[in-house]
Amino acid sequence: MLLKFMFHIIILMITGPIYQLASAQYSNTTQSECESICGTVTIPYPFGTKDPKCYADKWFEIECRNTSQGPTPYLKSINLEVTSFDQMNSKVHIMNPVFRWNCPNSKDSHPVVDMKGSPFVYSKEDNKFTAIGCNKILFLQSNGSEVSGCVSLCDSYDDDEVNNNVAFGADGCVGRFCCETSLPSFLSEFNVTVEDLREKNSSNECSHALIGTEYWYRVPFGSSYEYRSFRDLAIDFVPAVLEWVILQESSLKFPIVGANCINVTSSQNRPSGWRCQCNSGYHGNPYISGSCIALRGSSDIRTRAKWAIIGVSSSLGSIILLLGIWWLYKVVRKRMIQKRKEKFFKQNGGLLLQQRMTSTEGNVDKVILFNLNDLEKATDHFNTNRIIGKGGQGTVYKGMLVDGKIIAVKKFKVEGKVEEFVNEFVILSQINHRNVVKLLGCCLEAEIPLLVYEFIPNGNLSEYLHGQNKDIALTWDMRLRIANEIAGALFYLHSVASQPIYHRDIKSTNILLDEKYRAKVADFGTSRIISSEATHLTTVVQGTFGYLDPEYFHASQFTEKSDVYSFGVVLVELLTGEKAISSVRSQEIKSLVSYFNVSMEENRLFDIVDKRVIKEGEKEQIIAVANLANKCLELNGKSRPTMKEVTLELEGIRKLDKKFTAEQNHEEIEVGGIEDYQPWVGYSASNSLPPLSSGTFSLDSEVIPIVTLK
């Protein structure tokens, strides 16, 4: 009993100061003498009410309004209701307006959301653009241009059918009648337009569109959740998340004691300002000097030890007891860390991963299990300055290991759903191809699973084709080589890999360029391995608007020819330098595929081809590539070539390029005298594939049949 009593005394001596620190932390979130609560919401600095000294500047002023729900905080500058604040991550949760068209029992709603010039932008990581309707194309517009969009499909429209089929579950938009997509970076204002997908006029049908969090459709029900149905969409607002910075002209003074503040430089759509976080191991409000207080870590262990030694130094027995407690603490802490790692391992799909890997052949022995501490050091604790990419699946960081090796670390956004992480790991661990991004390993002991890849330094193909990156212009020879490398990688996935793999999201932003500007196919989160006997994959429609196979749209059946269609769009991008979807073109041909088809049908191919391509490429080559793209974009998937045939055709076109170069060097150019290769005659949509003759060539150290077009 005495030992038990002394044990409790020492624990109080050790933890007492810690509780005081914790209390100080949570009480020091607002400026002194300022109101900090509106209704049930606590208002932390830099936000505040009434007195200007209580908030950083006018953008952060909160107006506490009396509503039917009681006192409710509003961001006065943009007139949006606030539900909570997250000052540690520089985010604020708001209620965002919903767009409606032609809905019974409710008025049309076309709200204006404009935060240009403010420190606020919509969080790409936390929000999605969701649309609901029947055979509608809904465009998300910003600054007068379409920046995103999605297609909502159904076979027929009936109120009862919609009510029974449109629903939201744990995975978001499921079934027919709805679609969703990610937001562009740094969106500060938007509008939504709706168009009919089919020729039949269905403009009187009800449609909705909104920007909201991934789980806006969840409604609390007891200890769990219910999910909204179509009938519930008379709501006017849904939860959304804004990110903020402290603008340069703010009265807030930097640096802030105890906080790590980063000067965020401005871009085309991003305001310039400051963003702060408490230093590693500290918690509190990083926008108030001295508010960040240490609660864990080695400094706290020394503090606890100091208090314990002072309390028990009067007797040798107490010191021995303290050492025993210290040993017990180490053992318990070690077990807690081990249990936590086991928990995260299971939570992140470790058991599912083991099961999947035992049933497949792959390069598992070559895949490294990284330590979380090593990856945190490599990425400077996942510093926002290290971010090199964001997407619907997660965020990618650039890092450097202790041996100097540069890596890319993908931090998934799963919140309990790990199928995409497991799927990408299993697929990439089975691929060994020079034109597919290489998986180095993973980390399962973190709260959020991590994948580690080779670092690809020169960005993605889209940046070079569409003017975001002007460091180097892609020559015609480079474009042909990149097209051939992409085709070879897809041929490998479809026909050479141990089991066929459908990529399902081929687009120019998923084609990375290494230090020698060689193509690397990336982003396999939605890819699927199928059996050798299967001819298609039946699934909910997923992908990127502008690249999706029309057959996949209507039948929800993805085949290898669906990847061929997406590759055809990329091939047209390489030829024209145009975007897959562009608001610059007329209303009828916003789609690059439509624009290309019309030009081919009207014999105006060279009116849309990139000027650099016309200048550097031979006419016969350009026509041959255009005809190949035209075949890849056939509406009937069975009429499209396989990726093997595409690869061989591109190889032949590149050989034709070398032959032209050799003839020019000897001043013996005879366009009509080429015997070993003939491009497809003409470039109308009616041309068919030419006959094939046999031969071989080497692709990635494996000899495969080759055919030469005659």
Image: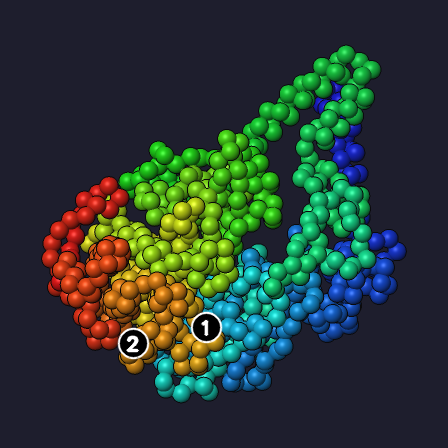
Where residue 582 is drawn, which disc sits there? 1
- Say whether residue 302 is visible: yes
The image shows residue 669, relative to residue 108, as above or below, that is above
Q: Position of residue 495 (x, y in %)?
A: 23, 51
Amino acid type at mark 2: Met
Q: Quadrant of residue 549?
A: bottom left
Q: Position of residue 107 (x, y in %)?
A: 58, 85
The image shows residue 133, relative to residue 37, as above or below, that is below
The image shows residue 532, relative to residue 605, as above or below, that is above
Q: Residues within 10 Å of mark 1 (few under 14, many from 20)?
A: some
Pick the quarter of the image with the N terminus: top right
- The secondary structure type at the circle numbered 1 is loop
Residue drawn 75% across the image and 19% down it: 2
Residue drawn 74% across the image and 73% down it: 67
Q: Residue reaching furthest right?
A: 33
Q: Nearer the viewer, residue 20 or 592?
A: 592
Residue behind mark 2: 600
Where residue 463 is drawn, which disc sits there? none
Q: Nearer the viewer, residue 585 or 662?
A: 662
Residue drawn 79% across the image and 62% down it: 57
Q: Nearer the viewer, residue 435 or 164?
A: 435
Q: Position of residue 191 (x, y in %)?
A: 57, 75
The image shows residue 534, relative to residue 454, as above or below, that is below
Alpha carbon separation for disc pair 2 and 1: 19 Å
Q: Quadrant of residue 616?
A: bottom left
Pick the quarter of the image with the C terminus: bottom left
Q: Position of residue 221 (x, y in %)?
A: 57, 62
- Say whether residue 38 is visible: no
- The secondary structure type at the circle numbered 2 is helix
Question: Which callout, 2 or 1, points at the residue further toward the start of the chain?
Answer: 1
